[in-house]
Structure formats: structure tokens, C-alpha cells
Image (cartoon, grey):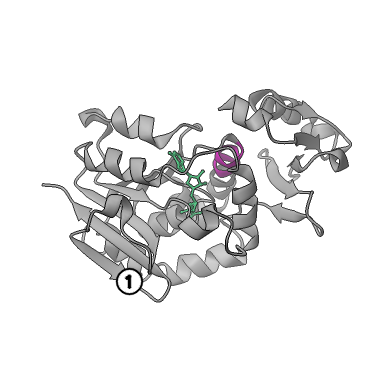
Amino acid sequence: MTKKIQQLSLVVVASNKESQQQANTIAEQLACTVSDKPGLHDLALTVQSNPLSKIIDLELTLQKLNPPLKLLLDFNSKRSHYRKQSGGGKQQHIVRATGLHKNPGLRILDATAGLGSDSFVLACNSAIITLVEQHPILSLMLDNAVARAQQINELADIASRMQVCSAIDSIDLIHSLNKQHHYDVIYLDPMYPSIHKKQAKAKKSMQIIQYLLQYYDDQADQLLSAALSCGVKRIVVKRPTAAKPLINKSPQSSIESSKTRYDIYIQH
Ligand SMILES: C[S@@+](CC[C@H](N)C(=O)[O-])C[C@H]1O[C@@H](n2cnc3c(N)ncnc32)[C@H](O)[C@@H]1O
């Protein structure tokens, strides 16, 4: 894991004196350095202390692009509020695919948490969700975003249902599941095929993910194989509408929109 991070040109930046200590800790965790010359690196993770809260903000900048791309995970953003409102509907495809519309409070393992957007919608709809993201930078940013959301009255309840695991490979986690770690649903949203091969011009946040994942293998098929053999009853896979199902295994049912398809596998 650390090796893959070390291949990236990454630096941690403390935005001021107050955030220096936390910047040092994060740099140690990510096995990189703290510098005040972020311009020399492809990626800069800026640690900003927040005067209103004890919790820092973590912003990632992909500097090698012109203009640079910035990523701050924020469940209090306008976009997240929109998702919270529109995602509140039981008719939302992801809600129906996971079965939350009929069974509120399901325990869901989001094994490909990414930016946490899908997890957030599921948590808005009563899911108790564990977020697993293999990339250490994204995993740290997710943890930070959930911690900040817990400080906001309107979001505290939702964020309390979101638990971020430290960066691990979900396949290992799924293989190690036993009855004490019971989940009702495993949710998988691996990188879309075209995005992984860099054929399509992805949206900004996905361009950053592509850069971060350049040394990671596409494990979409292995994720589904592991999920199907771990005893969890419902597995949901998000795919582009035109793509074949993973491991060429037909799901019991699918819920489809113009761009996205949710394949649903029920294990008896
Ligand atoms: C398309 S993104 C997921 C986006 C996410 N659903 C969201 O709403 O933001 C796919 C993510 O899955 C993660 N991933 C892929 N394979 C994984 C694995 N075996 N273990 C943990 N994370 C994995 C990738 O690192 C990437 O961040």
C-alpha cells in the first residue's frame, strides 16, 4: 500500500502554524514529506485548520494539470444537500437496488467508497454504512469529511451512520467476514471500464481518482467473486448501462437508468 503511494509525487502542506502538527502526522501516515513548496509535486494535500472547529480540512490538488484540479470532500456542500434532498426519495434507484425502500436501517458495506457520494445517499436513506476505500489518501479524506459532517447539526445523525475503515483492500476484508461482522448488503461501484482505460474525459473528481489509482489493478471481477462467496445475502453492483455484468454473471434483477445500471444478486 505505502509503495503505491510512494510512486506518486505527493507532498503534504500545512496551510498555517496551527495545522503544522497535524500535517506532520498525516505525512508520516502517507510516508511522504511536508513542504512549503507544493509547486514541485504532482499532488499536494493541504491541511487547513478550521477556526470554527477542532477538525481540520483536507484538500487535495492535482497540480500537474493546468489549471490544477482541487478536491475537498464535503457532505455540507450544495451538491451534497441536493443529493440529500433528491436522494431522500424512496424511488431513488440506488435506494431500491439496496432494498432500503422496504427495509430501513440495513447494514451496508460500501466496498468501493471512493468519494463517499453513494454512501452518503444511502446513509441519508437510513443505511448504517461501512465505507472501505483502498487508497490511503481518499480514505483519510473520507474519514475527515465524515468527522466534519458529525460537527454539523443537520448532518450529525446521517454522519453517525457512516463509519470509515482505514485504507484496506476490500477483497481481503470480504474474505475475512464472519458472523460477527454481519452485513445485509455489499455495494460495489468499481471504476467504469472506459474510465479505467482513460478513454473518456472524466469529470474532475474522477480525473483525480484516475491519477491516484494509476498503480492499482482493476479488481472489479475479484470484488464480485469475493462478495458472492462470503454469505452476505444481497450484492449490488453499479455499472454503466451498456457494460456486461461483472464475471459475465447475470444478476437476478437490475434497475436501469439512461447511464447507470444496478445489478442485484441475491444469495440464498
Ligand atoms: C468509481 S469509484 C467509487 C465512487 C463511489 N461510489 C462514490 O460514490 O464516490 C471506485 C473506488 O473503488 C475503490 N476500489 C476499487 N477496488 C477496491 C478494493 N479492492 N478495495 C477497496 N477499494 C477499492 C477505488 O480506489 C476507487 O476509489
Q: Is residue 2 above or below residue 163?
A: above
Q: Quadrant of residue 140?
A: top right
The relative height of residue 109 versus residue 91 in the rendered view (above or below) is: above
Decide: few, some or many residues near mark 1? Use Cα within 10 Å; few <14, some 14-19, many ≥20.
some
How far from the left and from the top, in percent, is residue 143?
55, 40
Residue at the left extreme of this rendering: 268
Q: Where residue 220 sits in the image (x, y, percent)?
A: 39, 46
Of residues 190 and 217, the one nearer the viewer is: 217
Number of numbered markers: 1
Task: List x then y, in percent, for residue 250.
Answer: 22, 58
Q: Is residue 36 left or right of residue 174?
A: right
At label 1, the amino acid type is: Glu
Is residue 256 in view from this perspective? yes
Question: Which quadrant: the N terminus?
Answer: top right
Q: Residue at x 67, y 52 (%)?
A: 71
Q: Secondary structure at mark 1?
A: strand
- Residue 14 place in picture, x, y as percent: 80, 36
Task: Find the magenta span and give its range.
Answer: 137-144
Residue at position x 77%, y 43% in the image:
42
Judged by its main secondary structure, the magenta piece is helix
Q: Magenta stretch containing residue 200, yes or no?
A: no
Residue drawn at the location 47% of the way across and 31% of the way down = 168
- Residue 49 in sight: no
Is 126 displayed left or right of 143 in the figure?
left
Return the residue at label 1: 256
Residue 143 part of the magenta segment: yes
Seen from the viewer's position, the closer of residues 158 and 22 is 22
| As drawn, 57 above or below 168 | below
